[in-house]
């Protein structure tokens, strides 16, 4: 019988090997986004997939805007998952918001993780003129985004998905993202978007002790290249790899590039 933790996060375990890789998806996505990486790694690694609460086939009854009012709650979920599966020293690959979620989890219990990989992660999305920080968005940009989400969610999805995916010559990729984004309850999507886009975890970066590799693609509407550089400068054991890929979802749009980069880092 599935435990409440495994049911809550729709946990799937695949592959074989002594070393475990956890793949953690980003906003508007779910664990199916990692299918290319699963195919590449499952013969040599044990793989753990899950859906954040509110996404995919997670337990929607577990979601409440009060509990999930910050990224710390998602980090707690991740640590509970590790405890339930008795995992330690795992490799975690986190896309987008899952980069900061895994960072927060690693600050609480670093023994759970041997390496972190961030794909399109950001510690803060809003520009901060006072500190000369460039996150990529003005607050007015985000306010307009929230307004568009609330006025007609599905129209917003159809417009946002192609921009986020960033590979206009392959519209099927944008359709895939639009489908997972549309599957989220609009009220949950709006609440989660606010939590993510208004978060600021810059102060936590210097405290991370787990070795971290930052994969940064080109023309990422959510995370400009300067953000990847900022992460690399402020996380003690970090390195930045600019990958030959476009948009915010390189693990979907350029899976062979992402897979090869991760493989080379693990081999090293």
Image (cartoon, rainbow, N blue to C red):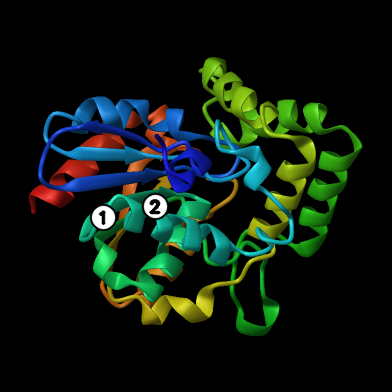
Mark 1 residue element: loop
In the displayed structure, would residue 87 be above or below residue 231?
above
Q: CA distance from mark 2 to mark 1?
A: 8 Å
Residue 66 in picture, x, y percent from top left: 73, 61
Residue 90 in picture, x, y percent from top left: 23, 55
Q: Which residue is mark 2?
A: 81
Mark 2 residue element: helix
Q: Which residue is mark 1?
A: 86
In the displayed structure, would residue 120 be above or below residue 132?
above
Report the quarter where the N terminus lies. Answer: top left
Asked if residue 117 can be seen in this view, the reply is no
Residue pictured at 8% horizontal, 48% vertical: 267
Extreme-front residue of the structure: 1
Q: Earlier in the sequence, mark 2 or mark 1?
A: 2
Q: Is residue 240 left or right of residue 158?
A: left
Residue 5 in picture, x, y percent from top left: 46, 48
Q: Which residue occupies the foreground of this view, 221 or 69?
A: 69
Mark 2 surroundings: few (<14), some (14-19) or many (≥20) residues within 10 A: many
């Amino acid at each position: 019988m599935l435990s409440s933790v495994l049911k809550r996060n729709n946990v799937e375990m695949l592959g074989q090997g002594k070393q475990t890789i956890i793949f953690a998806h980003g906003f508007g996505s779910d664990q199916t986004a990692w299918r290319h990486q699963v195919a590449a790694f499952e013969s040599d690694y044990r793989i753990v997939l899950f859906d954040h609460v509110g996404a995919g086939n997670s337990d929607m009854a577990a979601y409440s805007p009060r509990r999930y009012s910050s990224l710390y709650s998602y980090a707690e979920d991740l640590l509970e998952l590790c405890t339930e599966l008795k995992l330690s020293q795992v490799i975690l690959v986190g896309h987008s918001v899952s980069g900061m979620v895994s960072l927060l989890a690693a600050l609480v219990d670093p023994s759970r993780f041997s390496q972190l990989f961030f794909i399109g992660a950001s510690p803060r999305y809003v520009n901060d003129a006072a500190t000369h920080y460039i996150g990529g968005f003005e607050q007015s940009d985000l306010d307009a985004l929230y307004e568009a989400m609330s006025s007609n969610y599905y129209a917003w999805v159809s417009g946002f998905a192609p921009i986020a995916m960033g590979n206009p010559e392959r519209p099927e990729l944008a359709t895939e993202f639009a489908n997972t984004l549309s599957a989220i309850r609009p009220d949950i999507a709006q609440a989660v978007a606010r939590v993510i886009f208004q978060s600021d975890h810059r102060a936590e970066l210097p405290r991370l002790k787990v070795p971290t590799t930052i994969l940064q693609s080109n023309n990422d509407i959510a995370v400009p290249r300067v953000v990847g550089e900022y992460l690399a400068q402020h996380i003690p054991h970090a390195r930045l790899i600019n990958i030959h890929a476009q948009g915010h979802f390189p693990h979907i749009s350029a899976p062979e590039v992402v897979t090869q980069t991760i493989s080379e880092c693990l081999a090293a």
